[in-house]
Image (tube, grey):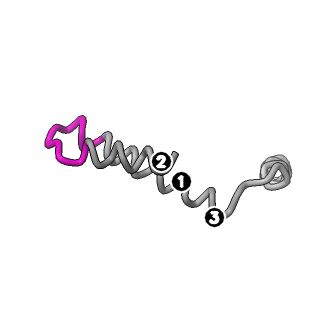
């Protein structure tokens, strides 16, 4: 997926349109999120713990 994002960024990068610039920015953001997720995967326990903290903070 990251390689495909890199290819798409390369194909759009030369464009000077606002739409092209926004597309590159969005793709770079998605890539950043995926790389961070790859380095520190979220487990079901992490999600449950986060949900539990929300409930505790509401009371």
Q: Residue at x 55, y 58 (%)?
A: 35
Residue 44 place in picture, x, y as percent: 82, 49
Along the horizontal axis of the image, is 40 left or right of 19? right
Q: Quick one: SS at disc 3?
A: helix
When asked about the image quadrant of residue 8, the answer is top left
- Check if mark 3's residue and mark 1's residue have beta carbons within 8 Å: no
Residue count near mark 1 (Cα–Cα under 10 Å), binned few <14, some 14–19, many ≥20: few
User: Are the residues tagged 2 and 3 within 8 Å (C-beta)?
Assistant: no
**Label drawn at residue 48:** none
Residue 33: mark:
1
Tell me if residue 29 is in the magenta stretch. Answer: no
Q: Position of residue 14 (x, y in %)?
A: 17, 47
Q: Which mark is residue 30?
A: 2
Circles 2 and 1: CB atoms closer than 8 Å: yes
Extreme residue toward the top, this view: 19
Hey, which quadrant is residue 40 in on the image?
Answer: bottom right
- The residue where tag 3 is placed is 39
Viewer-side residue, 37 vs 4: 4
Q: CA distance from mark 3 to mark 1?
A: 10 Å
Q: Mark 3 or mark 1, which has the lower sequence index? A: 1
Disc 2 to disc 3, how far (Cα)? 14 Å
On the picture, is 48 further left or further right than 19?
right
Residue drawn at 16 percent across, 38 percent down: 17
Q: Residue at x 52, y 45 (%)?
A: 1
Q: Nearer the viewer, mark 3 or mark 1?
A: 3
Residue 53 sits above or below residue 1 on the image = below
Highlighted range, magenta: 12-22
Magenta stretch holds residue 20: yes
Q: Where residue 53 appears, x then y in whole percent?
A: 81, 54
First along the sequence among labels 2 and 3: 2
């Amino acid at each position: 997926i990251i390689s495909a994002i890199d290819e798409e960024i390369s194909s759009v990068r030369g464009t000077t349109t606002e739409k092209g610039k926004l597309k590159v920015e969005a793709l770079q953001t998605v890539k950043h999120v995926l790389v961070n997720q790859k380095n520190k995967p979220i487990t079901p326990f992490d999600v449950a713990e986060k949900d539990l903290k929300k409930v505790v903070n509401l009371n």
